[in-house]
Image: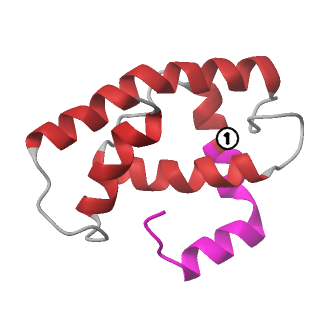
Amino acid sequence: MDYFENVMPFLVTSEGLWPGDVSEQMKQRAEEGVAKHLPLFERFAMDYGTFGHLVGTSLTWIDLLMTDHFRSLLKYFPHALIGYPALSGVRKVVGAHPKLREWRNAHDQPF
């Protein structure tokens, strides 16, 4: 099972985008997905990116995608990025971009 198969059912159900109730099993599967895959994302960022970027030295769509995802993830798992300095760096750098910060403040989207 890949990361999004583990995590997305919990997130979209929690946000009310899918019908139904969040089960403890659904939350546990999401936690397992986070624990299994965040180390891989961290390693990828360390191997192919620079501080604040998952790939290369400048802002890319994957930085935007993952930063938005982290915003949703941290709402339910506030400590998820502890121990992942490269991923935390991406979140910090992208979050500090003035135009992106302005857009995010105006658009409270779960994903």
Q: Count up the numbered dots.
A: 1
For image coordinates 65% across by 56% down, the residue present is 95
**In front of the other: 104 or 21:** 21
**In front of the other: 4 or 101:** 4
Where residue 70 sits: x, y (%)? 50, 48
Residue 24 occupies which quadrant of the picture? top left
**In front of the other: 77 or 15:** 15
Instruction: Give left or right: position of 61 versus 91.
Output: right
Residue 76 covered by magenta stretch: no
Amino acid identity at mark 1: Val
Residue 31 occupies which quadrant of the picture? top left
Badge 1 is on which residue?
90
Tell me which colouring the rendered structure shows. secondary structure
**In front of the other: 103 or 62:** 62
| Residue at the limit of the structure toward the front, as seen here | 1
Q: Is residue 102 above or below residue 71?
A: below
Where residue 75 sits: x, y (%)? 34, 54
Residue 106 covered by magenta stretch: yes
Say which quadrant the N terminus sits in. Answer: top left
Question: The magenta stretch spans which residues?
Answer: 91-111
For image coordinates 65% across by 76% down, the residue present is 103
